[in-house]
Image (cartoon, rainbow, N blue to C red):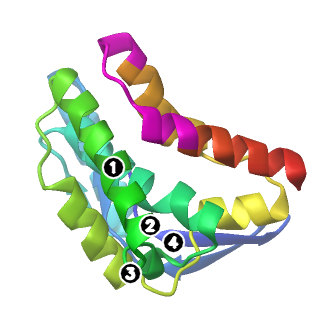
Amino acid sequence: MTSHGALIEGFGMVRHTGVGETVVGSLTSRQEGLVSECKGVFDRAGIQTRISEDIAADVWLKTLVNAGINAIGALYEKTNGQVFEDEETSELAENAISEGELVAKAAGITLPENPLEKAISVSKATFSNKNSMWMDVASGRRTEVDAINGYIVSEGVRLGIPTPVNEELTARIKAALTRT
């Protein structure tokens, strides 16, 4: 899992736009050697990498941060930092994250950090960034909404947890793509 920023500028052209954390881990203890080897490869390539003790929890945390920023930034055409400056979008972000947090808890996940605090911190650190979902919607490209907000929805259905905000955000992003 990585938080490095990248921008596809054309066929075979990707620009690195921001340094972030890279984390590797395994869902089973049987892969510890492979995880350590993977970390070494990234470290030697100059990408400092951390081995996670609970990669599922780390992935959930990143999903919740993205659920609170990406679709909302794309739909309201707000940079990451602007999402939490506006009352309407800030409330939407908080509700999307809160729903996801309930789903994660029901799935037995213990989050390593408070996801709302992490989302606010990320939004401040990347204040002027237009997130990838915004860029994808603007370009009419497929987005990651199903893997972020949509995943929260599907897991909520599976676990019997209502997720109306994430359902709405997912539907609105898909509708926005049909208009581009």
Q: Amino acid at mark 2?
A: Glu
Nearer-N-terminus badge (2/1): 2
Residue bearing mark 2: 88
Q: Amino acid at mark 4?
A: Gly
Tag 2, which secondary structure? helix
Number of numbered markers: 4
Determine if the magenta segment contains residue 148: no
Taking the image as shown, residue 93 lies to the left or right of residue 113, namely right
SS majority, magenta: helix
Nearer-N-terminus badge (3/4): 4
Of discs 2 and 3, which sits in the foreground? 2
Taking the image as shown, residue 54 lies to the left or right of residue 100, namely left
Of discs 2 and 1, which sits in the foreground? 2
Q: In the rendering, at what x and y percent does residue 132 appear?
A: 61, 64
Mark number, residue 95: 1
Is residue 25 visible in the rendered image? The answer is: no
Residue bearing mark 4: 5
Mark-to-mark CA distance, 1 and 4: 25 Å
Q: Which residues are magenta?
A: 157-168
Tell me which residue sits at (44%, 66%) in the image.
Answer: 88
Q: Tag 1: Cα neighbours inside 10 Å, few (<14), some, or many (≥20)?
A: some
Of discs 1 and 4, which sits in the foreground? 1
Tell me which residue sits at (31%, 38%) in the image.
Answer: 99
